[in-house]
Amino acid sequence: MTQSERRVFLINELLCEQPRYPDLKIPTDEQEQRSLLRSLLNIRMPEPVSERFLEVQNAYLREEIRGKGITEISDLQPIQPEIYLWQGDITTLRCDAIVNAANSQMLGCFVPCHGCIDNAIHTFAGVQLRLACAELMKQQGHEEETGKAKITLAFNLPCRYVLHTVGPIVGSRLTGRDRELLASCYRSCLELAEKNHLKSIAFCCISTGEFHFPNKEAAQIAIQAVKDHKTQTHSEMEVIFNVFQETDLIIYRELLGTN
């Protein structure tokens, strides 16, 4: 099957699961098809799926990621010993684990084509990731606590694992508790990565988007948490600070260049 054929197959299969859209026609435009497929993946509940669907989905997503260009950690240059700064799409990074800024449901973002990292990671990992997260939540029996972390396979992403952590949501003002919870996110991910013998981890800018944590202070907390972990544990884990916006790139360059 071509990518176009795979995309149409997946859209048809997902539309069959959505009886509320009986008259929805598949657009002929390629980009509109991509948006429709992503939307249908985003709203899909964590329910069983056929092996045929997974076979086609996996081939489709891996080709889409390959087309975007995969970045190897070996291609990056450290800005400090074992610490990297990289601006790019975290779903295209090949390392041991990437960190997802999750919500307390831990099921991914259900808003069609939303711009958050949670949406992107779940979209390109495939439906298996939501199913894996749902199983973890079922076993746990309650929503995920802020500052904790969980680990799953990465499925169709180039990395091996995804670490999911729930950052603090900042209200009208930033509090000491917010700062401590954000630091806990980084510590929990690092501890979980060490426990699973991972050699490299890529952090997104946890809580700085929809959760409104001030970018510079979030970066200061992130860097300090990583440095404290390395000092206390003598860890040789490679840590990548992944940024997407130019604003965060400038902040991290400034902080890592002076620490």
Image (cartoon, grey):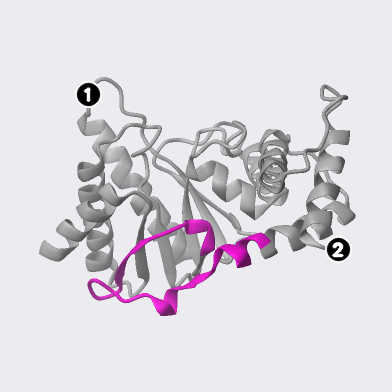
Residue at 10 percent across and 63 percent down: it is 258
What span is colored magenta in the figure? 64-92
Q: Residue furthest left?
A: 258
Residue nearest the viewer, comparing 190 with 46: 46
What amino acid type should be assigned to the residue bearing mark 1?
Answer: Arg
Is the Cβ of the residue at disc 1 closer than 8 Å to that at disc 2?
A: no
Q: Residue furthest front?
A: 29
Q: Could you tell whether 16 is left or right of 37 in the image?
A: right
Residue at 25 percent across and 42 percent down: it is 215
Q: Mark 2 highlights which residue?
A: 1
Is 244 included in the stretch rendered in magenta?
no
Relative image position of residue 79 (x, y in whole percent): 24, 71
Residue nearest the viewer, comparing 163 with 3: 3
Q: Nearer the viewer, mark 1 or mark 2?
A: 2
Q: Could you tell whether 146 is left or right of 48 in the image?
A: left
Element carrying mark 1: loop
What amino acid type should be assigned to the residue bearing mark 2?
Answer: Met
Residue 155 lies in quadrant:
bottom right
Q: Mark 1 highlights which residue?
A: 173
Residue 152 lies in quadrant:
bottom right
Query: Which mark is on residue 68?
Result: none
Is 77 included in the stretch rendered in magenta?
yes
Q: Quadrant of the C terminus?
A: bottom left
Residue at 69 percent across and 58 percent down: it is 61
Q: Is residue 259 visible?
A: no
Q: Quadrant of the N terminus?
A: bottom right
Element carrying mark 2: loop
Residue nearest the viewer, comparing 92 with 183: 92
Relative image position of residue 86 (x, y in whole percent): 35, 63
